[in-house]
Structures are given as structure tokens and as C-alpha cells.
Image (spheres, grey):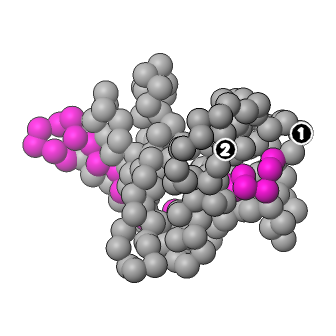
Amino acid sequence: MSETWQVPDAWPTVAAPWRGALAQARHAHDRAGLEDYIQLATIRADGTPANRTVVFRGFLEQPDRLLCSTDARSAKVAELHLNSAVELCWYFPRSREQFRLRGTATLIEAGHPDAELLLVRDTVWLGLAGSTRVQFAWPEPGAGRADPTQFDIPAPAKASPPAVFCLIVIEPELVDHLQLRPFPHE
């Protein structure tokens, strides 16, 4: 079965209907370690698509916006500065469900003018494991690895995120939920 939700301009005070289906799919996969990995597609400067896996970091409530984190030096940040249109694809192999979310992304970088969103950025940073935080002290993403000692460094302090820590806030405009288990597919 496939369900598509058009996101309204004015959000209700309750969670969007697709959130329940997504929560069930994530819960069914929480022991497999697959529930937080999603594919994020952006548009390069030349107009071609770019797709990569990112880690889901939670929701920003009212409206139902999704959170991911990234290095501000990464290509996806430059792409999002040029074009904020994105699409997420979340596949759950056990339940054979796919969620596609199309929308716009907002970057919450150091110095963002919205103090509330900066607080969300700080909160996400505090929740990261040291093994994740250390990646933000490594050389620029995509840079060569000629000197392996550049990666043998301690994790940045939890107290406050480094300038390169960026939060991506994705506001869905269209959500498509495809259930592949029934045959024929619904």
C-alpha cells in the first residue's frame, strides 16, 4: 500500500499522520541499528543530484521537522546554500517499507540568527557520542588522508559545538509511504 501526505501550510498542534507509521517502522528496526540511517539527496551547482547517507538526529516539533547533523565544510552544505530543496529516502528492510520525504532544508550553523535554533544545535551536539564528535575535529571532508595522525586526536569538548558543526533542519512538504510487503505491492 502506498500513502502520500501533502503537508498543509498551517500545521496542526498534533503530530503529522505519517509520524505514527514512521515511528512503527523505526521501532521494528531499533535493534538492527538501521533505524537512524537515511539517504539525503541535494542538488549540485551544475543541477545534477547528489545523494548520501546521513544520520537522523530527531524531530523538531510543531511543525514536524527532521534533524540531521553534518560538517559545515561538506559539499552538501555548499549545495544547500545554493538550493534548499531536498528529498529523503528511509528504507526499512524488515518491514519492507520506504518513506520518501520531499521538502526544504534550513542550515543551523554557528552564528545563526535564531537563538532557539542555536539552542537545538547545542542540544544535538550534547547528545553525540565522543566517536561522532571527534569527526568534527578531523580534516575537511573529502580531503586526502596522507597523514593518518590527523585522525588520531581527542574528541572536542561537549560544552559547546565547534564552528564546523552544522544542523540540517528538514521541513517536509510531501511524504510518500510505500509498503512493499504485500504482493502485489500496495
Name the residue that disc number 2 marks: 138
Above or below residue 160? Residue 5 is below
Residue 57 in which image quadrant: top right
Name, please, the residue furthest toward the top.
31
What is the count of numbered marks?
A: 2
Label 1 to label 2: alpha-carbon separation: 18 Å
Secondary element at tag 1: loop
Label 2: few (<14), some (14–19) or many (≥20) C-alpha neighbours in 10 Å: some
Residue type marked 2: Trp
Residue at horizontal 72%, vertical 52%? Answer: 165
Pointers 1 and 2 in contact (C-beta within 8 Å): no
Residue 29: x %, y % from top left: 43, 26
Decide whether residue 169 is among the magenta residues: yes
Residue 13 in which image quadrant: bottom right
The answer to whether one can see residue 13 in this image is no
Label 1: few (<14), some (14–19) or many (≥20) C-alpha neighbours in 10 Å: few
Name, please, the residue furthest toward the left.
184
Secondary element at tag 2: loop
Residue type marked 1: Ala
Mark whose residue sits in front, 1 or 2 = 2
Name the residue that disc number 1 marks: 159
The residue stretch that appears in magenta: 161-186
Residue 22: x %, y % from top left: 46, 41
Residue at horizontal 31%, vertical 40%? Answer: 97
